[in-house]
Each structure stands twice: as C-alpha cells, then as structure tokens.
C-alpha cells in the first residue's frame, strides 16, 4: 500500500509500554524506522492531538495517534545557476554568506531555488554527501536570516563538522536588532525549546523535562530609544533558537512576524538577524579559524537611520 501523501489515525490500546517510533514502525511496515523517526522529529506525529517530536516518547496508556506522511520528493536534485557569495573555499569546505530569502535545502513548499541547488551548480560533486536532499549541509539558517554557513565537500569532512558542532566547539555569533530592551545589558538565556504543540511550523519555550536544551548569550552593542542592537552567541543550534529566546525576553527580533509583532516596527521586509561570525577548526588544521560576514546593506541602512 502506498502511504505517501496520506494521514493515518491509530488507537494505542496495549497493556505494556512501548516507544512511539517502535510502535509506528510495527504498524507502518512499508516505512523504515528511521523514516518514522524523521517524521516524528519534524512534527508530523500527534498523540492525543498534541505534536510529539521525540521518537523515544513512551506510549503507556490508551491514546489516539495521528501521523501525516508527506509526498515523497525526487532524490535527484537539479543544479540551478544561482549566484553565491563564497567567503572561503578549499578542498574540504565551502563557507557561504547566505542572503536573506534563500532556503538552505529543499523542504515542503521549497523544492527549487535553495542554497543546495546553487551549491550543486558550483560543485556537482556535492550530490549525495551527507544525504540526498541536504548534500553537504551540516547546519542551517532560517530563510530570512542572512550570514555564514559552512558546507562539507566530502563525507569525511561532513562527519568532522558534525562532530565539531555536536561537541560545541564551533563559535557562532549573530547580530540582532530587537524591539525594546533586554532586562540586563548582557545575559545568558538557558531555556529549552520544543516544537509548538499547536503548530508544527513553529517552535516554543519548553518547560520541565520537555524540549531540548537551548543556550544563548547576548551582549548589547548599542541601545536606541525603542530598540537594542545585540551580539548573540548560541551555544546550541536549535531551530529558531535566537528568535524564540528573544521573544521569551519580551524583545522579539525586529521584522520577525512569527514570534514578534504582526507588523515590523521598522521599514524592513525581513527579520533583523545576521550570522556575522563563525569560528571553527577545519579538517587537517590545528587551530580555529575565524570567518566574518559584515551586515548586508539593508540591515546597515536600518541602523544608520536610528541614529
């Protein structure tokens, strides 16, 4: 039976406890367990109407389970001649200064025009490295966030970079203009993040044992009447982390209509968030190297007009 592009509902009635991913793998025999785990992590599974994004979630009492299986996408990506701002390149990595408005890799609703398509036009040998739909991709930036992103050019480097990020050896610093003023000029936000139980496209603050650890540190660069320019360093790389943490402080990122104000407080058609600096030890090198991408013109103009 073809299960793609379908929604299924099940009733869990077992007397014994079982992991959510294991239970679904037993029922949906045409889907691999890893595929089911990916669907859970990306918010396509609900238990009693609430999105659960942990494959290890334990089913221990009768409940209703819903799973949505989106249409499968073609495995072959077609390169597209999209301009790239390459900050650095060697035999192992490409470091790109991504423009706002570009999605990093293909996803639902964005099957063309992504950074991956542009990278494949630049280097077709990236195809398949680290995954069919995300060749070379180790970390991501939101569509409307600009700045530095590191891409692996071979499998060895892909694993190396994954380890660097996992062990928190990579320093990533962003520039953010926020509405209002944080409670202190400098601070550390250590509040977990989880998938929003009511909207799988959004993230939310997690309380108790829910969600994943998320740590952000910020420092005030300049304070304006109604805004604050911040340097933000993230020690973890959760989806929408800075945007969720800033909103949690009551100072959403300017232009962030998802977690902040419905209409931007300043004339800007994107969120004011830029990945300015990345410090990383590259393969076959002994010391960390620092790469910088200065603010794009549209963000610098906003700052200049605040003086």
Image (cartoon, rainbow, N blue to C red):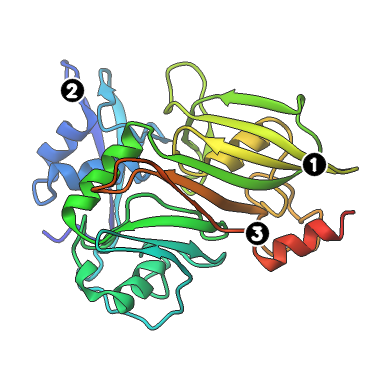
Is residue 138 positioned above or below 196 on the image?
Answer: below
Q: Nearer the viewer, mark 3 or mark 2?
A: 3
Q: Is any part of residue 203 visible from this angle?
A: yes
Assess disc 3: are there few (<14), some (14-19) or many (≥20) residues with their C-alpha within 10 Å of its C-alpha: some
> Disc 3 designates what residue?
295
Q: Position of residue 202 (x, y in %)?
A: 52, 45
Residue at figure coordinates x 60%, y 53% from the top left: 274
Q: Nearer the viewer, residue 56 or 160?
A: 160
Classify residue 122 as left or right of residue 244: left
* Residue to which mark 1 is pinned: 222
- Residue located at (65% from left, 64% from top): 296
Q: Which residue is mark 2?
A: 18
Coordinates of residue 112 in the picture (x, y in percent): 38, 75
Q: Compute the Cα span from label 3 to label 2.
A: 49 Å
Per the image, label 2 sits on a secondary structure element best described as strand
**Sequence order check: which comes first, mark 3 or mark 2?**
2
């Amino acid at each position: 039976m073809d299960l793609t592009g379908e929604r299924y509902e099940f009733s869990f009635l077992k007397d014994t406890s079982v992991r959510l991913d294991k239970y679904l793998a037993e029922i949906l025999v045409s889907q691999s367990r890893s595929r089911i785990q990916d669907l859970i992590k990306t918010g396509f599974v609900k238990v009693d109407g609430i999105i659960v994004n942990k494959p290890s979630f334990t089913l221990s009492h009768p409940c209703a389970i819903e799973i949505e299986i989106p249409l499968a996408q073609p495995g072959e990506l077609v390169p597209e001649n999209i301009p790239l701002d390459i900050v650095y390149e060697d035999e192992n990595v490409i470091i790109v200064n991504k423009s706002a408005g570009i999605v990093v890799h293909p996803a639902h609703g964005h099957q063309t025009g992504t950074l991956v398509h542009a990278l494949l036009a630049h280097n077709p040998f990236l195809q398949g490295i680290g995954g069919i739909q995300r060749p070379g991709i180790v970390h991501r930036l939101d569509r409307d966030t600009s700045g530095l992103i590191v891409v692996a050019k071979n499998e060895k480097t892909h694993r190396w970079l994954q380890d660097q990020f996992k062990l928190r050896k990579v320093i990533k610093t962003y520039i953010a203009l926020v509405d209002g003023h944080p409670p202190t000029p400098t601070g550390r936000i250590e509040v977990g993040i989880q998938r929003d139980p009511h909207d799988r496209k959004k993230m939310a603050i997690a309380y108790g044992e829910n969600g994943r650890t998320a740590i952000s540190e910020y420092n005030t660069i300049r304070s304006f009447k109604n805004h604050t320019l911040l340097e933000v360093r993230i020690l973890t790389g959760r989806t929408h982390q800075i945007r969720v943490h800033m909103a949690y402080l009551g100072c959403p990122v300017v232009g962030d209509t998802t977690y902040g104000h419905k209409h931007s407080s300043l004339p800007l058609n994107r969120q004011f968030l830029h990945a300015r600096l990345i410090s990383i030890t590259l393969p076959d090198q002994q010391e960390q190297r620092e790469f910088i991408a200065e603010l794009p013109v549209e963000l610098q103009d906003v700052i200049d007009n605040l003086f």
